[in-house]
Image: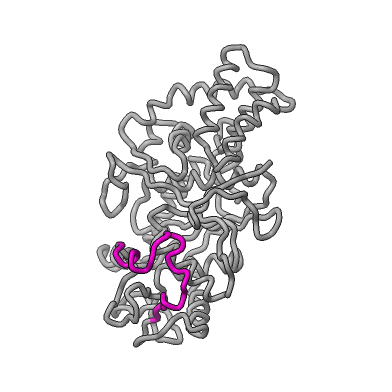
Amino acid sequence: MTFRLFTSLGNEVREFRTVVPGEVRMYVCGVTPYDVTHLGHAFSYVQFDTLRRFLEWLGYRVRYVQNVTDIDDDMIMVSKRQGGRAIAEIRDENDAILRADLDRLNVLRPTVYPYATDHIPEIVETTQRLIDRGHAYVVDGDVFFDVASFPRYGQLNGLTLDELGKRENPESKRAHKKRGHLDFLLWQQVEPGDPAWDSPWGPGRPGWSIECTAMAVKHLGTQIDIHGGGSDLKYPHHENEIAQAECAYGVEPFCGWWVHNGMLQLDGVKMSKSLGNLVLARDLMRTYEPDHLRLYLLSHHMRTDANYVPGAVDALADRFGSLRAATAHAAEGPPNREALATMVAHLEADFDVPGTLDAAERVARRVLGGVSEQGEATALRETLRILGFAFAGARGPATGDFSP
């Protein structure tokens, strides 16, 4: 059985191979919990949860790390807006809401769920490594990564430095101090009263991208197999992560597969907290069963941008009912090997979950029509377990399993 998976680095589908045979080191960028999370976050984490489940079904031991960015400009801004409320309180409140949503959607708990603020020593150490190796420089308490020192910068996005310079870049700060236009902060001075930690360059706080590099290396090592996140993170965040890790630790590549999910849109516009055009998973789950919503989220290929419109979940009611009803016909004994292979083949070919769901629906129709072969309902149940559906008996929070 050969699994082929697309990577954004090189824009190609390649046979999946890991750094350590039989083991997958997987890091997925988590949220910045300064406000409520929305259906776009659920889309991302359900997709990566399903990829993780498929890798485990293939026999891999998966170590899945998903971080929490609990110190950045937005966290500080909300804290000030709320009268100086503790950032940890804001984080814990919003993180609990997200976790409750993902639990209901049967998303497996991460193996490690690190907070950036718990990794300041690792961040300082990685930053110092970059300075010592000539890839970063200090200007009056701020530390910048020197993009010119890393010739491969831009490879993830397939763009030249000039082309990247024309892109929107939330990491572009304190231009008057920088040597190069694309240089970005690893460590920054803070305003009086803002959260700060001691460092060799004075009190301050981390830049954005260095946090993920330090946490990934801490919990997975200097080379990992899969790095996931939304397509909006390809530049600058993930481009920066490659540069930081490969320059700090002398490894190439830092990550074998860069896997990006598409953006969930509302009426053609990217759903985001900053725009306020949000549909909340918890609101939809007041109307629809969580497995029904999971089916909607998995009905779009991971890499595609999906456009949510009212009634989109309703349109899948017949499919949801058929899959659940047919699964109830599963009996003891082995699954029909041919039916299982037909459904799983789509997952093997670049993780085509919608293709698997189409094939699963065809099996369900045969089962419900009384024309299926022996073991087809069992094969259907096995496939839907791989996809994480609680009604098929997939392990996870929705079935009482809160283990990673």
- Any magenta on residue 35? no
303 shown above or below 248: above
The residue sitting at the right extreme is: 333
| Residue in view at x 60 percent, y 40 percent | 348
Q: Decide if residue 92 is on the left or right side of residue 58.
A: left
In this view, 299 is above or below 74: above
- Does residue 151 belong to the magenta stretch? yes
Q: As displayed, is residue 101 above or below residue 159?
A: above
- Closest to the observer, 167 or 284: 167
Q: Residue at x 55, y 43 (%)?
A: 350
Do we see residue 393 in this rendering? Answer: no
Q: How is the image coloured?
A: one colour
**Location of residue 294 in the rendering, given as x and y in whole percent from the top left corner:** 47, 36
Q: Position of residue 162 (x, y in %)?
A: 33, 68
The N terminus sits in image quarter: top right
- Can residue 14 be spotted in the picture? yes
Q: Position of residue 72 (x, y in %)?
A: 36, 67
Residue nearer the viewer, 248 or 154 = 154
Residue 401: x and y in percent read 60, 44
Q: Is residue 334 above or below residue 53?
A: above
- The residue under the point 59% across, 68% down is 222
Q: Residue at x 38, y 55 (%)?
A: 232
Q: Quadrant of residue 367?
A: top right
Q: How many marks?
A: 0
Q: Which residue in the rendered view is the most extreme toward the top? A: 370
What range is drawn magenta here?
Answer: 143-167
